[in-house]
Structures are given as C-alpha cells and as structure tokens.
Image (cartoon, helix red, strand yellow):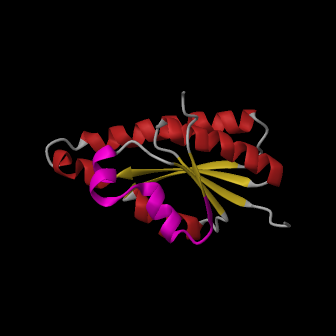
Amino acid sequence: MGLKYQNILVAVDGSKEADWAFKKGIEIAKRNNAKLLLVHVIDTRSFALVEAYDTVIGDRAEKLAKDMLENYQLQAMDAGLPEVQYEIDFGSPKVRIPRELARKHKVDLILCGATGMNVVERFFIGSVSEHITRYAPCDVLVVRTEKEN
C-alpha cells in the first residue's frame, strides 16, 4: 500500500487508553513523517449545571487540559517529531472531533482510546470512539490497552 498519513489527530482525555493512542500516534507519525495534532475537547455538557453556580470550573478544566497537552507535546517533540501542535476545544467530543476538527485540520488519521473517562455517557448514548469511527472523514484507529491475564 502506498498510503502515507500526513496529518494525524490524537484525541486525548487523560485516560490510559488515550495515553496508549498518543504513544501509537507518535510512532505512526514518525514512520510517515507526519504532523501530529493533539486534541482535547472539554465536554461542556458535563458541567453545564455546575457552572451556573461556579464560573471558575470551565477555567480549571481548560488549565488542566492545557497542562496535559503541553506535556504530551513535549514528549512527542522529545521523541523526534518536529511538528506537534495541540488544540483545546469545547462541546461534545463525539461531534467536535470527527465532524469539525478533523475537517478543519485536513486530518487523514484519527487515533483515540477504545474507552475514555466518561462511563455514564458511554452507557446512555454510546462511546466517543464509536461516534468518531462512524462520522470521521478519514481513517480511525481505536487503541486498546494491553489486557492483563
């Protein structure tokens, strides 16, 4: 196959599966001499009611996301990737990643963890990775952690 990925998006949410997706993303980007885009979407639906009482919660979520993404960016650059960017967005990750961010950045591969941080949402309305796979305009690699025996 002659397919080479040029713009790789890795969706991270702080979960172990997202960390594995990030590590695989580095290796794939190195093999393809690709740009790496690290994305975290702050799910505003999860704290919409709380924010009415505490306006600081959004700022805290953004600060935590920025710290996480800057750490990932440094790791990727230390691993030898010259082009590593990150983006923080707000809204529904299952909508923003495949339908908006992937198109905006002309992504040709998305990596995400098989399961993320939000167990309740996964139970009621399906996983973020499932929606990314269904609606992405490009290839998607869903990464699982190693299972212990």
Q: Is residue 6 left or right of residue 62?
A: right
Q: Residue at x 52, y 64 (%)?
A: 133
Quadrant of the drawing holding the N terminus: bottom right
* Relative height, residue 16 to residue 110 (above, below): above
Q: Quadrant of residue 93?
A: bottom left
Q: Is residue 47 left or right of residue 82?
A: left
Q: Where's residue 75, x and y in %?
A: 67, 33
Span of residues in magenta: 119-140
- The reply to whether the magenta stretch includes residue 36 is no
Quadrant of the drawing holding the C terminus: top right
Q: Where's residue 119, x and y in %?
A: 32, 44
* Relative height, residue 88 to residue 137 (above, below): above
Q: How many marks?
A: 0
Is 62 or 116 nearer to us in this picture? 116
Q: Where's residue 52, x and y in %?
A: 15, 49
Q: Residue at x 50, y 35 (%)?
A: 16
Q: Residue at x 75, y 61 (%)?
A: 6
